[in-house]
Image (tube, grey):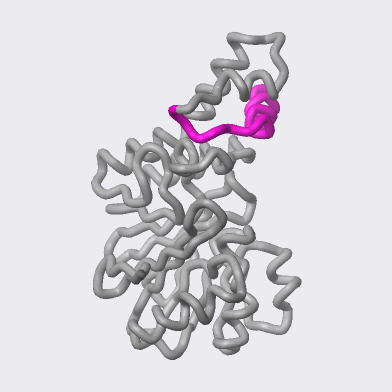
Amino acid sequence: MNNLTKINDNLYRLTLPYQDIYTTVYFLKTDSGVLLFDAASFPEDVPQYFAPALEELGIDEIKYIFISHNHRDHAGALEALLKRYPSATIVSRSPQLKEKFADYDFLMPEDGDRLLGVFQVVTIPGHTLDAAALLDTRSGILISGDCLQLYGIFGSGKWAANITLIPEHLAALEKLRTLPIQRILTAHDYHPLGYSYEGKETIEAALNHCVAPLLKVKDLIAAHPKSNDEEIAALYNSPALPTLGAHVVTAVRNTLK
């Protein structure tokens, strides 16, 4: 099965299995070199998935490996990739990754920084503190990784909207509304819009879906003042939505305080 999809002449999407879902990496080509967005999950992903995709795309060198955040399904194959491409520069906002890969070239970008002249770093904390996306200024495509989670991932009871840095996340969503984004591509299929959101109305709907679960939890807390966080989560959860954990309720409650 070929899991490599062409988005445009400069952008390709590769899906790889992870537990009961899939994760995604993106290959971004420029005249100044190739950037790899995220590094999948396991060392064996490199020979099994990366190598055939890179060969098909005619890529023999990677300039940057951009890690959207330091979670297993996005950074798990990083070490194996660096063994194959030791001259690649890691780009990540994770202090833990910087310490782990101290022997490699490493950049810790700030919001608004540019890579290869055309990729704008967009910080979107919420899921994690180090979470960041890339805006390709040539096409207006924002590759968001896990930064934008809507209601959570389709097809699994494990992967609900996992946003715990709520004020930071809400501020980042408002920032996104001001950027010239034409399309958003994510790492997973998020309820209810999937992985690709194109056009002003769909993008606005996606951003609103990122806020909606948090507002629903807020309303449940207000309506059930004697219920604890586990009970609120149980009230939220239904077969129609990905299952939300009590730790998200705790984060909403702490924000309200």
Q: Is residue 226 above or below residue 118?
A: above
Residue at x 41%, y 39% (from the top left corner): 191
Q: Is residue 59 above or below residue 152?
A: below
Q: Is residue 216 above or below residue 64?
A: above
- Numbered label tally: 0
x%, y% of residue 166? 59, 36
Q: Is 24 left or right of 127, judged from the image as shown?
A: left
x%, y% of residue 244? 58, 32
Residue situated in front as seen by the camera: 82 or 234: 234
Residue at x 62%, y 49% (from the top left corner): 128
Q: Quadrant of the N terminus?
A: bottom left
Prevalent SS, magenta region: helix
x%, y% of residue 114? 45, 69
Question: Which residue range is magenta in the image?
Answer: 240-257
x%, y% of residue 109? 57, 66
Q: Is 143 left or right of 213, judged from the image as shown?
A: left
Q: Is residue 85 above or below residue 174?
A: below
On the question of residue 3 being in view, the answer is: yes
Q: Quadrant of the C terminus?
A: top right
Residue situated in front as seen by the camera: 48 or 139: 48
Residue at x 74%, y 73% (from the top left corner): 100
Residue situated in front as seen by the camera: 100 or 236: 236
Residue situated in front as seen by the camera: 73 or 101: 73
Q: Is 197 left or right of 68, judged from the image as shown?
A: left
Whether residue 248 appears in magenta in the rendering, the answer is yes
